[in-house]
Amino acid sequence: MRSRRRNRFDIFLTILMIFIMVITVYPVWYSVINSLNSAQDISKNGYALIWIHDFSLESWKAVLNNADIIKAFGITCARTVIVTVMQTLITAMFAYGFSRSNLVGKKFYTIIGFISMYLNGGVIAYFILFNALHIYNSFWVYIIPCLFGGFYNVIIFNANFKTIPNALFESAKMDGAGEYFIFFKIVIPLSKPVISALGIFTAVFMWNDYTQTLYYTKSTAIQTLSYYTLSITKSSEFAAKLGSTLSSGTSSILTTLSNSAANYKTIELACMVLSAIPLIVAYPFAQKFFEKGVMIGSIKG
């Protein structure tokens, strides 16, 4: 009887997992096939749901031959790599110091840290601060404000560092090792799972974030790929909306606008696929430690 219930549960779980997998993968598949569909076919027959109707590489040629998109891709890559490495390192170093029992003023840092988790200055305060630091409208606005990962990540690192036996630290100090040696040669190698997990979360957030570009830059020279995709989306919506408000007597203009909206849409989908490729490629390399790191991160203390 118990075995039968177990089998029913396994079947239910399998069906549920397949359903979740399908609704997760299908948007990616939808973007890929429609980015490879011709704009004329989309304008005439609508978007493909299962397979490509009229194969065309025009949208991908438009994306890969567009210097602004390639530049935005490069800026996004540079921002993601620099912030992920620096933020993970600085936050881990802070958390290592915070995890030591002999840290002076630990209660004060704890209070400040918890306050920062619930309160922040908001967009206007950040705007004034970035202006005062002379990083507004420069590439540094993507880097400097993101160097520290926040107190939430400190709590996760702290939980991981406390699992390392104190005897290991004491033994290293007896052999003459300093704090930097202990951190880089002992703590970091023993913390690969949590570093990988937080590194992936940071990289995904930085790669997809467009708000920093929206609020704190006005130059087209430092736009990120996610913001560029958002701009194309707005353009396609505007073209489609303008076409729908015209009278039926202006059929040639309607056709032009409809084709224009479809062109924007296929280019937008190609940009979305392009922006997803690096994360899809990078994830399997970090997966080895990712699951264990997430489990460590779920136990906070």
Image (cartoon, rainbow, N blue to C red):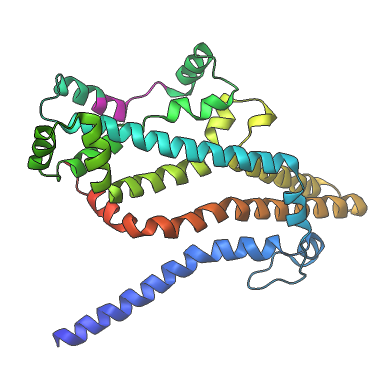
Q: Is residue 160 above or below residue 122?
A: below
Q: x, y percentage for residue 130?
A: 50, 18
Is residue 156 at least partly visible in the picture? Answer: no
Say which quadrant the C terminus sits in: top left
Q: Residue at x 27, y 56 (%)?
A: 292
Left or right of 206 in this view: 237? right
Q: Quadrant of residue 195?
A: top left
> Residue 114 in magenta?
yes
Q: Residue at x 74, y 41 (%)?
A: 67
Say which quadrant the N terminus sits in: bottom left
Q: Residue at x 18, y 20 (%)?
A: 108
Q: Which residues are magenta?
A: 113-121
**In the image shown, does 20 or 300 lie closer to the viewer?**
300
- Counting the numbered discs, the total is 0
Q: x, y percentage for residue 149?
A: 36, 34
Is residue 129 at least partly visible in the picture? Answer: yes
Q: x, y percentage for residue 196?
A: 35, 49
Q: Residue furthest front?
A: 175
Left or right of 186 in this view: 130? right
> Residue 30 in magenta?
no
Q: x, y percentage for residue 25?
A: 51, 65
Q: Is residue 161 above or below residue 268?
A: above
**In the image shown, does 7 or 158 lie closer to the viewer?**
158
Q: Is residue 55 above or below residue 201?
A: below
Q: Residue at x 32, y 56 (%)?
A: 289
Left or right of 274 in this view: 58? right
Chief secondary structure of the magenta portion: helix
